[in-house]
Amino acid sequence: MSARKLLAIAGCAVALGAGASAQTVLINGAGATFPYPIYSKWFSEYNKVHPTVQINYQSIGSGGGIRQVTNQTVFFGATDGPMTNDQLIAAPGKILHFPTVLGAVVPVYNIPGVTAELKFTGPVLVDIFMGKLTKWNDPEIARLNPGVSLPVADITVVHRSDGSGTTYIWVDYLSKVSDAWKAKVGVATAVNWPSGVGGKGNEGVAGLVQQTPGAIGYVELIYALQNKINYGSVQNLAGEFVRASVPSVTAAAAAAAGKMPADFRVSITNADGKGVYPISSFTWLLLYESPKDKAQSKTMVDFVKWALTDGQKFCAELGYAPLPEPVVKLELAALAKIKIS
Amino acid sequence: MAGGAGRTRRSGDLGFRLGTGAFAVVLVLIVCAIGFELTRQSMLSIEKFGLNFWRTQVWDPVAGQFGALPFIWGTLYSSILALALATPIALGIAVFISELCPNLLRQPLVFLTELLAAIPSIVYGLWGIFVLVPFVRSVESAMPQALRSLPIFSGPPLGVGMLAAGLILAVMVIPFTSSVAREVLKSVPGAQREGAYALGATRFEAIRAALFYARTGIIGAVMLGFGRALGETMAVTMVIGNNPRISASLFAPQYTMAAVLANEFTEADTELYLNALIEIGLVLFIITLIVNSLSRLLIWSMARSSSTAAVAAPAEPPTVEEAA
Amino acid sequence: MTSRPTVWRKLLSSLFVGFCGLSVLVALVPLAFILFYVINEGISSLSFDFFTKMPKPVGEPGGGMANAIVGTLVVTGLGSLFAVPIGILSGVYMSEYAGTRFASLVRFAADTLNGVPSIVVGVFIYGIAVLPFKQFSALAGGLALGVMMIPIIARTTEELLLLVPGTMREGALALGATRSRAVFSVVLPAALPGIITGVVLALARIAGETAPLLFTAFSNRFFTTQLTQPIATLTVMVFTYAISPYRDWHRQAWAGALVLVTIVLICSLLARYATRRLESIQSM
């Protein structure tokens, strides 16, 4: 085949590629691993309904989502820990938060010989993650779980090695139940862990816990469900031991729905009420109010509208709780602020 | 004298020199640019922490406190461990292939060691997570209680940790050190060995003489392996446990400079955090520069001193690890 | 009559020889293990789907790595477009002007660049090719890989050109050729098979890199040919899948690893074969 023919074919291929891309809208986003299962489902389903829209989302952790959207190397970010005022000021433009689903962070564990569901309280979890409780048969844990025979095994704490909104939700809860934790470690997407092994992403933590006998970690509920890892119940403010589930997470949001701040940044951990799962949280998409690329902006706004309405039906099967109606209404109104032309 | 043709040739030569030289300059510029960019983007951290960056243990993104000592510790510990495990084996292989091996086996063995070098580090990492770590965990669990009390063996048997990282790095380093050592041994003049045998030496003694003659080159080969271990990212980050803590224990999860860069780079959410990470990258750059330069210097001085002696080694096209 | 010291010396020698042989076995054991696991685990997950389908959402079994395979070809191709001219011509300069101080500087720079950890190259390219353009892209990924390939190609070219007998160059120059003519028409073609082998080996090595792509090419769940967009690559995808908790993704990671190792194996074999042919031709 002559060189000229090859060149001609190559030229056609490039033109075809360019032509096809003229209609396809490619949007890049990055951020939280917490909602990754539902987001990947949404982007796939949305692509089925709108084949020219490709939303490429990489789950690199909430810290990464905030960073990359601030750098504008991605069009949108996703985080489970809302941006701080400092972070918002540092961004080149105004960034808006949009809650998408509700999720729960559960304590997962892998204890040889134990298949029962363990009960934890906030203070006990604090002590474990501070490294004060080092053995599974510690009286503090045994006291809460009278029927279970706990082995004399070392506790291995597994946490996130990357900046994570899941971490944010977890330490936010620990800080609310323990002043010592709040003072020593604090609340952020990445903290200086007193002990333990680091895994990358919810995926990494789940993987490490699965592979390490005696491990305890924290992951978003769906990761525990999909991988059939044991997870425990946590005591809420009302004193009940509640297991994470769609109803218990929805209960946590119920109180917040009434007093949602205008920018939607609210923490619902350790919420008061019956049947509330105390380590629940919203997760947010981060969008610029006036992005440069208006075509991408319009596509993204359409997607978010779909996600807040049609998309919510995929929540339950993946273990997320759908947003309360009043919140959806407020968000659809807020979406109008985004410049799409 | 064809002055006209001579002038054409000279200008043709000048064009050639400038043309190829320009591309060579690009190469040099790239290296300078890397050093420059890394320094420029870590200024904030350099100014704020100064030398304390390398003496402080605390890596706390929340409080804005960044101390890189755990990463240096982890990098050095894992690399030195890898070197200790790999060097005897690599030298043994080099000696076997160049001195002791039946001719038929030589090419296949060289090929197999090249293959070890060519396996992508992500594949090492994958194998590390699913095969090596559980194996190490069972070894750690089987350790008798008496030894467990020693600081080097203390801690719960996680599998992930310094031992797994050291083992994987050792396997990755072996082919590099071995192939350079092989080249170095080849350049030892035959007269050395023949003389030793003529004096009634055993194989071991003759080879020992050759090794002694080639010692600078061999040290260079070992340092090359060290440089390789220092910079390895993927395989290490998948098996080391990612915990910025200084510990003497082989069982403890720790952290290396390359691994923390890979894990935390995309999400450093403050300028200071990002600068601190890039400063770690800058130091990694400088350390590997020094180690690699030293190793090349040693190998080169060895080659020079042996080429002034007799018999040159037969030409052999560079293999993949020589190019690495 | 053998004296005590001689017996001891002979024993030591045998032990030493034994140790060397053992070292070879010890080194081959992990190689065998890795190849065994990769082939064993990977082959059951290799299917037509793997090579032709896109990744599926989390939790849905099936899907493939078609976009990642194409992506690896794209970024490696981009890298070589950038690296081959710079590498070969730098190599030519280093061999032609080998005695000069600048050539020594270039050689030092090439060796330094060779030793730069791949993660540092990724950080560098992020700073100059991703951040200013506010875009992760296949181009940035190709640039990062290219930067890593340059020193390998440059040094290989230099060494091979130095191996070409001086008589060929001198003959060309004696016939009145300019230096550039002598090099490009006579010397380079003589070394070309070896240089191509070197380039192929460099490609195989770089195709297996992960770290420099993490913050440059990023990754993409979709198929794309746009060079200014993030692109999926085999190595990054294997990494993402390997550290996940999904058994299906683990199987796909092994399959991806098998593809990577096969590419490397084929390139190494080709290089060996080409080298053997080259040696036999040159000795004629």
Image (cartoon, coloured by chain):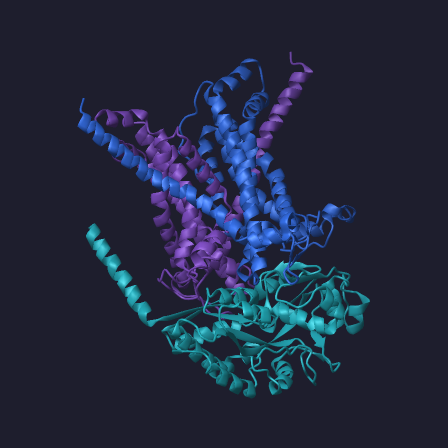
Chain colours: A cyan, B blue, C purple
Question: Is C269 drawn above or below residue B251 in the view shown?
Answer: above
Percent across and percent down for residue B240 are: 62, 52
Question: Is A232 drawn above or below residue B23 in the view shown?
Answer: below
Q: Quadrant of residue B313?
A: top left
Of C17 and A244, nearer the camera is: A244
> In the picture provided, is C72 more to the left or to the right than B191?
left
Classify the position of the N terminus of chain C by image quarter.
top right
Mark yes or no: residue A340 visible.
yes
Of C154 and A134, nearer the camera is: C154
Q: Quadrant of residue B315?
A: top left
Q: Residue furthest top?
A: C1
Percent across and percent down for residue A138 are: 80, 65
Mark yes or no: residue B258 visible.
no
Of A35 and C256, nearer the camera is: A35
Q: Residue at x 50, y 56 (%)?
A: C41
Question: Is C186 drawn above or below residue A157 in the view shown?
Answer: above
Percent across and percent down for residue C151 are: 42, 41
Disc count in the image? 0
Q: Residue at x 74, y 82 (%)?
A: A238
Classify the position of the C terminus of chain C by image quarter.
top left
> In the picture provided, is A290 more to the left or to the right than A125?
left
Percent across and percent down for residue A325 are: 55, 87
Of A163 and C34, nearer the camera is: A163
